[in-house]
Image: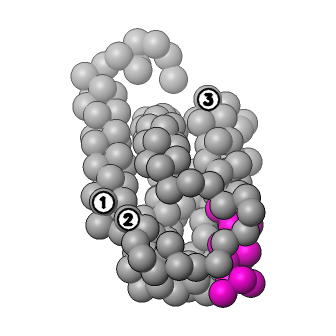
Amino acid sequence: MTIEQMKSPKSLITLAAFVLVVIGVGAAIGTQTAPGTWYANLDKPPFNPPNWIFGPVWFALYALIAIAGWRTAMLAPISTAMVLWVSQMLLNWAWSPMFFQAQMLWGALAIIIPMLGAIIGFIVVSWPRDRIASLCFVPSAAWVGFATVLNISLVALN
C-alpha cells in the first residue's frame, strides 16, 4: 500500500472504523467482564500478572490488531488473511465472556487455542504481502501464547 493510498479519504475512514470497532467492542467487553470475586478466589500460578496490566496491554494490542485489519482490508479484503483476522477477532471477543462471565475455564481454553492458531496463521499468511500487518500481530501472538499457558495453568490448578 502506497503512502498516497494510505492517506486517501476511503482509507482513513476505513482505519477509523477498524480502530473504533476493535477498541470499542474490546473495551465494552472488558468493562462487562472485569475480573471479580470468582477470579480472585482461583488458585493461580506464580507467573499470573496483576489485574491492572490487562487493560493497558489489550488497548495496545487492539490498536495493532485494528491497524493490521485495516491494512489487510485495504490490500486484500477477500483473502485468507482477512478470514484469519476476522476469526481471531471473534474468538478474542468470545474469550472474556466465556472465562469471566460463564466462569468456564475449559470453555475459555477451547476458544483461546484456535485464537492463537488464527493469530499465528495471520502472521504467516500476511508476511509475503504485508510485513507491517504481519508484524503488528507478533505482540498478540506473544501475549495470547502467554494467556494460553495461563489458561492451561488455571485449568490444572482449579
The answer to which of 110 and 1 lies nearer the viewer is: 110
Identified by mark 2, the residue type is Ala
Q: Which mark is residue 31?
A: 1
Contact check, label 2 and label 1, Cβ < 8 Å: yes
Residue 112 lies in quadrant = bottom right
Residue 94 lies in quadrant = bottom left
Position of 32 with respect to 132 (left or right) is left
Could you tell which of marks 3 and 1 lies nearer the N-terminus? 1
Q: Quadrant of the C terminus?
A: bottom right
**Residue at image coords 36%, 49%:** 22
Image coordinates of residue 142 in percent, x first then y, are: 70, 49
The answer to whether residue 132 of the structure is visible from this angle is yes
Residue hosting label 3: 132
Identified by mark 1, the residue type is Thr
**Residue at image coords 38%, 65%:** 34
Image coordinates of residue 53 in percent, x first then y, are: 52, 47
Kindly report the distance in space between the C-alpha atoms of the residues bearing marks 3 and 1: 30 Å
**Residue at image coords 35%, 16%:** 7
Contact check, label 3 and label 2, Cβ < 8 Å: no
Residue hosting label 2: 34
Magenta stretch: give its range: 147-158
Crowd class of label 1 (few under 14; some 14 to 19; many from 20; radius 10 Å): few
The answer to which of 116 and 76 lies nearer the viewer is: 116
Position of 20 with respect to 79 (left or right) is left
